[in-house]
Image (cartoon, grey):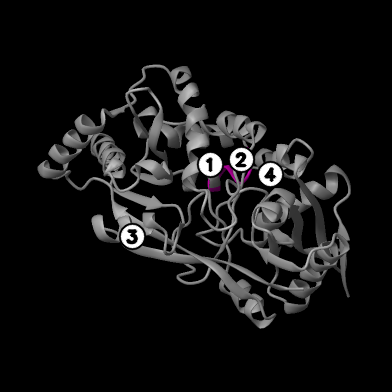
Amino acid sequence: MIIVRPVKGRRDLRKFIAFPNKLFKDVPTYIPALNFDEVNLLTDKNPSLEHCSRELYLAERDGKIVGRVAAIINRTVNEHWNKKAVRFGWFDFIEDYDVFTALLDKVIEYGRANGMNEIEGPFGFTDMDKECWVIDNFDARQNISTLYNPEYYIRFIERAGYEIKCKWQQYSMPANQPVPDKVGRLNKLIMEKYKLRLVRVKHRKELIPYAWQFFHAINESFADLYDFVPMTEKEIDVYIKEYFPFVNMDFVQFVVDENDKLVGFGLSIPDLNGAYKKANGHLFPFGWYHILRAFKKFDTIDLLLNGVLPEWQKRGVHSIYYCDMNEAAIRYDVHTAYTNPQIIGNEAVKIWETQYNTTPLMQRAIFGKSL
């Protein structure tokens, strides 16, 4: 018999967070999330709860945890996109269709009780959280900022009558390919014409004013993407504290205009996959060492976030920060870069496909249906 119950208390929360680590411990491509990050997202410390509500559920059979799911209602998203959707996230389960449906039934029940008429996911609270499932090439290398899922997740969600609402594409590419002279000359002309420059700082604290601009630029440049809504000031503050103390400044590409306003951005991080696996979700006692070491010695990078403000698109700004990133990769002897998911049909995907020597890595999708 399957019992699905709400998470109550810290002990249950620890079980909720630890479940996928136990489920996928022998899967080479699975990357454990850091426990303290999950706690900050799933407890009242999360500033997104000012405009979101949530309930966490655990599925048990014979006293053993066999699945988990979060039911989330993001009121800001629903108002902005004129919808009444409940989201499912943190959705992991053993290969058993009854467990899968029992967990989803709880999300549907939560949604209906709060007046929702559709369900979609996997989503987090905001677009900065992990979202969308892999739908092909399940054994491909994962980013630490993306979700892992085996093939049976897709088989079950399709069997339950859910349809794909939006698709993403990820790519791999050689990071140390030489920058053609003509591209360098063209970038110089673009910068001179529009009075642009790349931000160069010596100290990390000098990045903070640009970091605020960075997240506000994301709000503007991602505005038309599927289900995106602007991040709040409190959410931005959390993300700055989460990301920027650890970035390698050579892989932060901020393009600003003559008034020092950010117009385009690229943010990459060293490949931390191996370090996260060695840490197994824990910073202590030795997880911090593996992660810190990976920041100093790496030959692969993840292209975490990039974009151009709407009014600056189609002026070649993306070429400026991509080339600078390329030159940094050559200096560091980085051989491979992996993109984060890019929405298929978005301009960024066209740039990857037409202007760079990329190889499609995997596709991802959000699923949904009416209640």
Going 16% across and 43% down the picture, which residue do you hit?
183
Q: Mark 3 to mark 4: distance in Å?
A: 34 Å
Q: Mark 1 to mark 3: distance in Å?
A: 21 Å
Q: Residue 350 carries which label?
A: 3
Dot 2 corresponds to which residue? 231
- Residue 168 visible within the image: yes
Going 84% across and 50% down the picture, which residue do you hit?
12
Please report contact status of discs 3 and 4: CB closer than 8 Å, yes or no: no
Dot 1 corresponds to which residue? 219
Q: Quadrant of residue 332?
A: top left
Q: How crowded is mark 3: few (under 14 residues within 10 Å), some or many (20 or more)?
A: few
Nearer mark to the viewer, of 4 and 2: 2
Where does the magenta region start and end? 277-282
The amino acid marked with disc number 1 is Asn
Q: Does the magenta stretch include residue 281?
A: yes
Q: For the residue labelled by badge 3, is the local secondary structure a helix, a strand or a loop?
A: helix
Which of disc 1 and disc 4 is earlier in sequence?
Answer: 4
Quadrant where the image shows the C terminus: bottom right
Please report contact status of discs 1 and 2: CB closer than 8 Å, yes or no: yes
The amino acid marked with disc number 3 is Lys
Q: Mark 4 to mark 2: distance in Å?
A: 19 Å
Which of disc 4 and disc 3 is earlier in sequence?
Answer: 4
Q: Quadrant of residue 182?
A: top left
Q: Residue 38 carries which label?
A: 4
Q: In this view, does 151 lie to the left or right of 37?
A: left
Nearer mark to the viewer, of 4 and 1: 1
